[in-house]
Image (tube, rainbow, N blue to C red):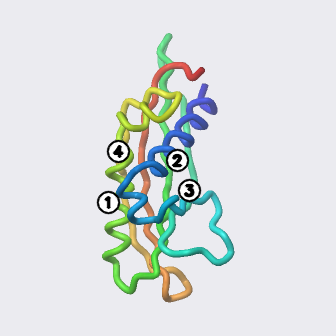
Amino acid sequence: MITDHAEALAKAVHAVLRDDFHVQDSFGEPPRLYDAAPEDPVFPYLTYGAMRSEDIGADETPLSAHQMTLHVWSRYAGRAEVLTLIRRVSAALTAEKLTAAGDIAVRSANPIYSDILRAPDGFTRHGVLRVSFTAQGETP
């Protein structure tokens, strides 16, 4: 069940971000959303990071908890663009949108934290967003 939920959730997150107008406005059309960024990417873009999943169900209730890390990358000189990117990605990831987009019943979707760093190249800003999800029920 956990791997089924994790896979269904990852697909739903990608579908919601891909189809969200504000995400498209920020990351292009189609939006630059990558598991691994290309060698010479166009900025800004988003990469999918670590995902942690665990079974938190009880008795006959299949329930799972997931934490997903999303990374946004910008070449804008200040933090403003990264802050906007994180806000737009956070706003797109609601339980209702994720449930509608996928084969999973998402009960909650909550940002846990965000962080903004300067990448080692000295030019790139790196935003980190960790989101917590709870999913219930069987996947097909």
Residue found farthest to the front: 29
For the residue carrying disc 1, how many other residues have a C-alpha within 10 Å: few (<14), some (14-19), or many (20+)?
some
Q: Residue at x 43, y 31 (%)?
A: 99
Up-down relation of residue 128 to residue 1 (above or below) = below
Foreground mark, 1 or 2?
A: 2
Foreground mark, 2 or 4?
A: 2
Q: Residue at label 3?
A: 48
Q: CA distance from mark 2 to mark 4?
A: 16 Å
For the residue carrying disc 4, how many other residues have a C-alpha within 10 Å: few (<14), some (14-19), or many (20+)?
some
Q: CA distance from mark 2 to mark 3?
A: 9 Å
Q: Residue at label 2?
A: 14
Quick one: SS at disc 4? strand
Pick whichever of labels 3 and 1 is earlier in the sequence: 3
Q: Residue at x 51, y 67 (%)?
A: 45
Instruction: Give the residue type that dot 1 points to.
Output: Arg
Pick whichever of labels 1 and 4 is earlier in the sequence: 1
For the residue carrying disc 3, how many other residues have a C-alpha within 10 Å: few (<14), some (14-19), or many (20+)?
some
Q: Left or right: 118 with respect to 140?
A: left
Q: CA distance from mark 1 to mark 4?
A: 12 Å
x and y, in percent, of residue 54 in the image: 54, 34
Labels 2 & 3 near each other (Cβ < 8 A): yes
Q: CA distance from mark 1 to mark 2?
A: 16 Å
